Image (cartoon, helix red, strand yellow):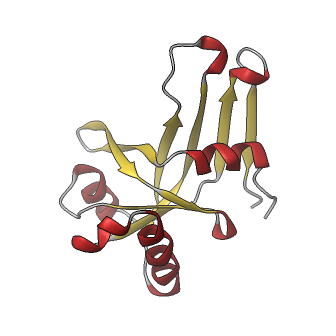
Amino acid sequence: MNPVPEHILKFIGEHHVLTLAVSTDTGPWCATCFYVYVEAVNLFIFTSDDDTIHISEVLKRQDFMVAGAIALETKMVGKIRGIQFSGPMKRLEGGALKLAKKAYLGAFPVARLAPLTLWGVTPEVLKMTDNRLGFGKKLTWKIDK
């Protein structure tokens, strides 16, 4: 796999909330989730219950593709930064679940207090806007297929 640029990785590591977008039978839907990203396996990890709109849609289909975003909230145009991504989403199981649980609980220990169903998105495309590098500057990464 070609490595994700360090500039993108640094931004991902500085944040912990992403917005996940899915397409449902009745239209689009977004969900906000606390996440941890594991660079070694290129995986956003988050928890969510089966009865939520976004997860119920994933459970209806195999190889469900989602999109997401991570944004820095600022009113200063010159400091605007954010990431959009897309890729397949799935419930984590087996070895992936063990890795995910360790990473997620390391970042959010309070999650031990509730039932924990972990999900993962493997980004196939990451696009970062960073106005600090120039107005509208974009950095794009795509996974090798």
Q: Position of residue 25 (x, y in %)?
A: 26, 44
Image quarter hosting the C terminus: bottom right
Is residue 6 among the parts visible in the rendering? yes
Image quarter hosting the N terminus: bottom right
Q: Position of residue 103 (x, y in %)?
A: 50, 71
Is residue 115 among the parts visible in the rendering? no
Residue depicted at x 58% and y 46% = 14
Total marks shown come to 0
Q: Closest to the observer: 60 or 40?
A: 40
Q: Does 142 sit above or below residue 42?
A: above
Q: Position of residue 143 (x, y in %)?
A: 73, 55
Q: Does 14 sit above or below residue 92?
A: above
In the image: residue 81, left or right of residue 144 = left
Q: Position of residue 94 (x, y in %)?
A: 46, 87
In the image: residue 67, left or right of residue 78 = left
Residue depicted at x 78% and y 17% = 134
Residue depicted at x 75% and y 35% = 139
In the image: residue 4, left or right of residue 28 = right
Residue depicted at x 60% and y 12% = 77
In the current view of this chain or complex, which residue is farthest to the right? 2
Q: Closest to the observer: 65 or 15?
A: 15
Q: Closest to the observer: 91 or 62?
A: 91
